[in-house]
Image (cartoon, grey):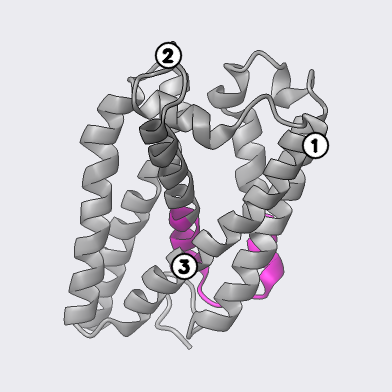
Amino acid sequence: MTRKTIIEIGLSLVALLMAGMSPNLFPAAQAGIAPMPEMARWLLLPSIAVLAIVFVLAAAGGLDRLKNRLLMGALAGLVATVGLEVVRIISFRAFGGMPGSMPELLGVLLTNRFMLGPSVTSNILGWAYHFWNGACFGMIFALVFGRKPFWWAVIYAEAIGVGFLLSPAVRSMGIGFMGSQMPGMPITVFLAHLVFGTILGLLCAKWIRDKGWLLSRGQ
């Protein structure tokens, strides 16, 4: 294993740790570990900065595989989140399949406005955080798996959906185990993550250059 490969793997592991930080803040806050504004200040913002540094180091060091996976994974995750949101919004607006607007809830938690309700600023931050989570999930998939058939991403996305339904975030909504008291919610989560995974998988299969997994030398 060459020095360049060791550096790439090390930076990839750092990127994975940082990308996994953001999606876990909401469940951690709902579990009572710490308020979201504090975690955003001390964990979310630094993790974004470290990911940017990793990308710059990858570009400067000629680590093209890592650079490609970070950038294309993030872009694929952002586009896939648009698809997820189309399903969520239709379910929420037309069928009442969700207890509320998730990005708005994230925004009021981030700005400590839960008792006051959403504002323009909280909505902007909530939507930005929501889409950043999608980008992070895209980077994680790209870093670990590389270019794979799209159904790998579908399984990955559905695992994320199940994890969300099992998380303190859903339990705190008071709608039963995995949202069982609101049957439209788990259905919405399943369909939304099916769309997310399909789009993520198709785009990663097109944009990721090699199919080697994290610890391989690439192909």
Q: Does the magenta stretch include residue 152?
A: yes
Which residue in the structure is indicated by mark 1? 94
Image quadrant occupied by the N terminus? bottom left
**Relative image position of residue 112 (x, y in whole percent):** 35, 20
Vertical order, 130 against 40 (above or below) = below
- Image quadrant of residue 45? top left
Name the quadrant containing residue 24.
Answer: top left
Mark 3: which amino acid? Answer: Leu
* N-term-proximal mark, 2 vs 1: 1
Tell me the CA gap for discs 2 and 1: 26 Å
Question: Mark 2: which amino acid?
Answer: Leu
Task: Report if residue 17 is visible in the image.
Answer: yes
Q: Determine the secondary structure under disc 3.
A: helix
Residue 30 rendering spot, x and y as whole percentages: 47, 21
Image height of 216 relative to 139, above or below = below
CA–CA distance in space, label 2 to label 3: 34 Å
- Residue identifier under label 2: 116
Amino acid type for the residue under numbered disc 1: Ala
Apparent side of residue 138 relative to residue 60 in the rendered image (left or right): right
Identify the residue at horizontal 41%, vertical 41% (top origin). 124
Q: Name the residue under label 3.
A: 75
Q: How many numbered markers are drawn?
A: 3
In the foreground, 161 or 5: 161
